[in-house]
Image: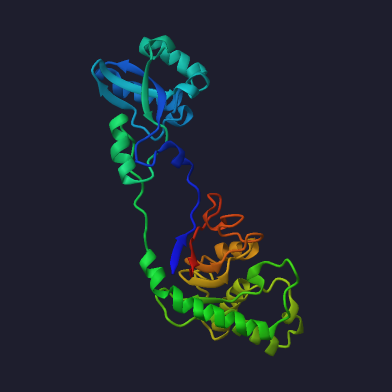
Amino acid sequence: MRLEEITAEDPRAAFWRDDGTPVATPCLAAVIEPRDASTLIAALHAALPSERGGVEHLKRIRRGADGLRLVLATAAAFDGAADTDGYRALASAHPALRRDALARVDAPGAAPITRAHFDVGSRLWPLARPPAARDDSPTRGDVAATAAARLADADADAAALRTLRDAPPPGAPKCASGGAALYEPGGAAAVAAAADELRRRAADGDGAARSHPLLHAPMLCVEARARAARAARGRGAAPGSAYLCTGLDMVLTAEPCAMCAMALVHSRIRFVVYRDADDRCGALGSTHKVHALASINHRYRCWRVDDA
């Protein structure tokens, strides 16, 4: 069994070679006297912020053979970034900041992705900070240790669902006919399964459940958690502050569609494991990477299992 973590493409990767060395980006720097460093750095926060110059990932100052060098902007960004009254006034007071006085320096073009990038890239020009330490929990080992048994549960769930509902129409996402199960972290037994929720709907007299177009396996698991939360409140339990699936893991036979992937965002799933990719509708790697979008307020990790 092979596990592949589905991650977002990192735009910084284009600025780092496979051997860990940075792609040098031309920048412009002023050669300044040490006594002026603090004053100029403070003034540049307003006159030419590092973000506007494309150098926010760099330390501003580096000592060179000719004195201190103060990086201002990438060579490509400088003319536009410095075209302000504030920078012109600052350069008038400090001639070292004038365009014709600046020196070209090479620096890494993006923030480091790994600690090795930080260590090697800082030799070219000091980087502002190392990459944030990644929370590796759950680890690949944690996922691998439970994936086979949990996928067997999901397969059993898919088989049960086939007896409980009509076959999805042609072209439906694979998760509409697959199985799904929810687990506590490290748990061996599922706390919710899609087929169980469909049986409850049928027992409640929901005759439309057999052919409801939105009752995909992941949605049924989320609904099962909602049902459990309503039942707990009915017994007098106080509403919890957590979301429906906070801290839980979901294992699926098939890659979720966009609807199901976003439902897992909103319910705050911890991670997802699936086996069968859906090249047409899958939203966790095949057509989109919903779980890793920078614009959403919760991101979760995702692995695809290859049984080959």
From the viewer's perspective, is 129 left or right of 240?
A: left
Q: Position of residue 200 (x, y in %)?
A: 64, 86
Q: Is 106 located above or below residue 219 in the figure? A: above
Total labels drawn: 0
The residue sitting at 50% across, 18% down in the picture is 79
Q: Position of residue 198 (x, y in %)?
A: 65, 83
Q: Residue furthest left?
A: 65
User: For residue 123, which quarter of the picture?
Assistant: top left
Q: Is 18 located above or below residue 289 in the figure? A: above
User: For residue 13, which quarter of the picture?
Assistant: top left
Q: Report the front residue among 66 and 51.
A: 66
Question: Is residue 152 among the parts visible in the rendering?
Answer: yes
The residue sitting at 43% across, 12% down in the picture is 99
Question: Is residue 138 among the parts visible in the rendering?
Answer: no
Q: Is 104 located above or below residue 172 in the figure? A: above
- Colour theme: rainbow
Assign the N terminus to one quadrant of the image: bottom left
Q: Position of residue 167 (x, y in %)?
A: 72, 78
From the viewer's perspective, is 229 left or right of 113?
A: right
Q: Is 38 located above or below residue 237 in the figure? A: above
Q: Position of residue 247 (x, y in %)?
A: 45, 69
User: For residue 159, which quarter of the picture?
Assistant: bottom right
Q: Residue furthest bottom?
A: 203
